[in-house]
Amino acid sequence: MTDRIPPVLRPEHPQARSLAGLVEEFGLDARGSLDGVEITGVTLSTGDLHPGDLYVGIRGQHSHGASYSTVARDGGAVAVLTDADGASLAADSGLPVVVVASPREALGEISAWVYRSAEHPPLLFGTTGTNGKTSTSYLLEGILKQLGLVSGLSSTSERHIGDLTVVSRLTTPEASEMHALLARMRESNVRAVAVEVSAQALTRNRVDGIMFDVVSFTNLSHDHLDDYVDMEEYFQAKLALFDPDRARRGVVSLDTSWGQRIVNGSRIPVTTISATPGVPAEWTVEILEERAEYSEFRLVGPEGRSLTTRVPIIGWHMAADAGLAIVMLVEAGFELEAIGHALEADGGIVAYLPGRTERVSGDRGPSVYVDFGHSPDAFLNTLAAVRKFTPGRTIMLFGADGDRDASKRLEMGRVAADGSDILVVTDHHPRFENPAAIRATLLEGAALAEHQPEIYEVSPPEKAIRVAVALAKEGDSILWAGPGHQDYRDIEGVRTPYSARDEARAALREAGWV
């Protein structure tokens, strides 16, 4: 269902650039006439094509993108950028062809040139890590707004340009989309942008051509071992962000041992932060009070500078992410005192994090939270946070992604069982895998837990949430982990409309809870 794929945000008033100028600027090999050819955009997909685009043909797993050059021409593309093999495939289109050794590696710098995104850029903040990227980015954006800046966001959940919001496709968009987004932000006078930077974004060149003012590292835990051979390769992908070609300064959390390794391997100046008592860091986060509505914390830095504020989400890890966001701002040149005054005026950090331990229930009945967490470490922290404010039983409902890192499924099941009183195993995005086989592995992992809860296997998730609500009583909490903010399920390549929030609310109403 391609109509459910979110749009690519581009500048509304693109400035044409000469194809001959591009070839000359980068010293590229070109075939065909360049005379009078002007480009106004860059795309990898014929589905996103705009008239005046430079179409980029990249070799895929099953076919070469350049084989669609004629389709691109018919859609308004004025030239093709591809490799030597792609040049032969693109010849029949009759379009001028620019040849590079690796189109993907060239995409970032060329997109930056076409969209002029390096000219008068906003302050750029990039956050990487296994968990906490989204939370840190949203909290950072929220504080920027409280400081009076027009802000932008690129996250797993959404893209923001001031008050404009669209749902995201990828955690970090392709380089051509990223530079188009930055150009659109420039049109909207955005002064600072928070960007989630995934490991895949770094290894697949999605943030090439971007210079971040401040980057940060949250943590590293078991995930994405379908893309990386082991944790070491996964770590090295994250470390690549801390390079002078990508960033000027960094902030590193020492709450996992990988943080110290980032510090040791960083090639840019970094400062450190920790919310773990006893861990020596230049900045520390101390939890002062935890309530269902907020977590209050004190951030203490060099020379005794400190700030006390609140984050509107439960869990120590959310306070840790908020502290990280504040220190990123300090590293960018904002005064800690000015940040403190802005937050104090509003009673704390003002931010809405879609699908991050998001409470979707009313004042009566069980508390129901939906969360995007889909790794063992995310389960561990979020379950602990929910349990802290649950006088009754903690009910966990979750599934696992199909066609993604299967090596973490046993541990997901074990952690979920250890942290819950009742466990309901269901489906998430099965994609092209057999959902029953995915559930079987999760149940196998749950059986390894030291603590054994009541366990139910229920499919599909629409039924599973109703079973969980039927099992729940006043004072109990249900944590539905995995879907979070997403509005679809991927079933055999089809994006089927679906909302965990809506299903949870419907289940509560049907059970008689307001």
Image (cartoon, grey):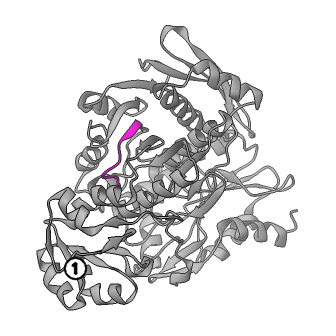
Q: Does the magenta stretch include residue 18?
A: no
Residue drawn at point x = 55 percent, y = 30 percent? 326
Is residue 408 placed above or below 502 in the rendered structure?
A: above
Give the camera-side residue of 438 and 356. Answer: 356
Can residue 315 be seen at all in this image of the molecule? yes
Is residue 116 placed above or below 390 in the rendered structure?
A: below
Q: Residue furthest top?
A: 303
Q: Which quadrant does the C terminus fall into?
A: bottom right
Give the camera-side residue of 399 and 322. Answer: 322
Is residue 161 placed above or below 492 in the rendered structure?
A: above
Where residue 180 appears, as percent x and y from the top left, is 44, 61
Classified by dominant secondary structure, the portion drawn in magenta counts as loop
- Density class for disc 1 (Cα within 10 Å; few <14, some 14-19, many ≥20) is many
Task: Provide the secondary structure element on which disc 1 rests.
Answer: loop
Q: What residue would you read off at disc 1?
A: 96
Q: Residue furthest front?
A: 36
Where residue 343 appears, as percent x and y from the top left, is 69, 29
Which three-letter amino acid code belongs to the residue tagged 1? Pro
Q: Quadrant of residue 262?
A: top left
Compared across the picture, whether 473 is left or right of 335 comes to right
Can residue 225 be seen at all in this image of the molecule? no
Residue drawn at point x = 40 percent, y = 68 percent? 40
The part of the chain drawn in magenta is 206-214
Residue drawn at point x = 35 percent, y = 48 percent? 210
Give the camera-side residue of 469 and 8. Answer: 8
**Count of marks overlaid on the render:** 1
Compared across the picture, whether 95 is left or right of 282 comes to left
Q: Is residue 213 magenta?
A: yes
